[in-house]
Amino acid sequence: MKTRADNRRRRELGLIHVAKKRLGLDDAAYRAMLETIGGKRSAADLDAWGRRAVIEHLRRAGFAPAASPGDTRAASEARAKAAARMLDLAAAGAKPQHAMIQSLWEQIVDLGVLDHPAFASVDRFAQKITGIAIVAWLPPAEANKVIEALKSWLKRERAKRRPDK
């Protein structure tokens, strides 16, 4: 029986392969990109976090999934954002703190604060706080430190944007 995770994995892998074709990546460039971004030379070997990082990288490189015929731009963007959110939560797996980190990061990105909004940047942020290079490797106590730091950052940025009373 296929699980939701299996279905998400297939969709993510399909998206990666479509992006490869649309961006015109040759096999050598594609495999080098996979290894640099996801740490593996094959998309099939990527874990959920690696697949998501590769998809984000491909989007920054200019890939945009095709909208369904008759879609309005707003509906298409809303659906894409919801799908991305589901993929991100699935990537968190058994560690709900990863989903919280992802959610907080997305809120900061939505405020337009970051020069480099890719989720891969949160790994660097977490490393500065914990010394651990990959969010997926964070034990619960360290993940909580990152969550609290993101909450504080988000609170400061929201306070800056409030109109004076």
Image: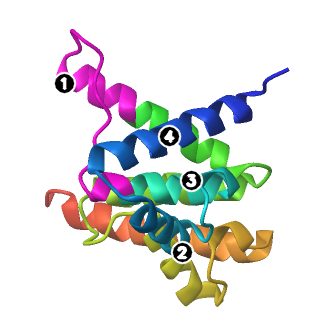
Q: Quadrant of the C terminus?
A: bottom left
Instruction: Identify residue type, mark 3.
Output: Arg
103 over 9 or under it: above or below: below
Who's the residue at 50% across and 60% down the image?
Answer: 53
> Pointers 1 and 4 in contact (CB under 8 A)?
no
Who's the residue at 67% across and 84% down the image?
Answer: 132
147 over 93 or under it: above or below: below
Instruction: Identify residue type, mark 4.
Output: Arg
The residue tagged with tag 3: helix, strand or loop? helix
Magenta range is: 58-80
Q: Which residue is mark 1?
A: 73
Is 40 a magenta residue?
A: no
Who's the residue at 50% across and 40% down the image?
Answer: 85
Q: Looking at the rendering, which quadrant does residue 58 occupy?
A: bottom left
User: Which numbered disc, 4 or 2, marks the residue that appears first in the sequence?
Assistant: 4
The residue tagged with tag 4: helix, strand or loop? helix
Q: Kindly identify which numbered label has been placed on residue 61.
A: none
Q: Which residue is mark 3?
A: 51
User: Which numbered disc, 3 or 1, marks the residue that appears first in the sequence?
Assistant: 3
Q: Which residue is mark 4?
A: 85
135 over 44 or under it: above or below: below
Circle 3 Cα neighbour tier, 10 Å, few/some/many (<14 / 14–19 / ≥20) = many
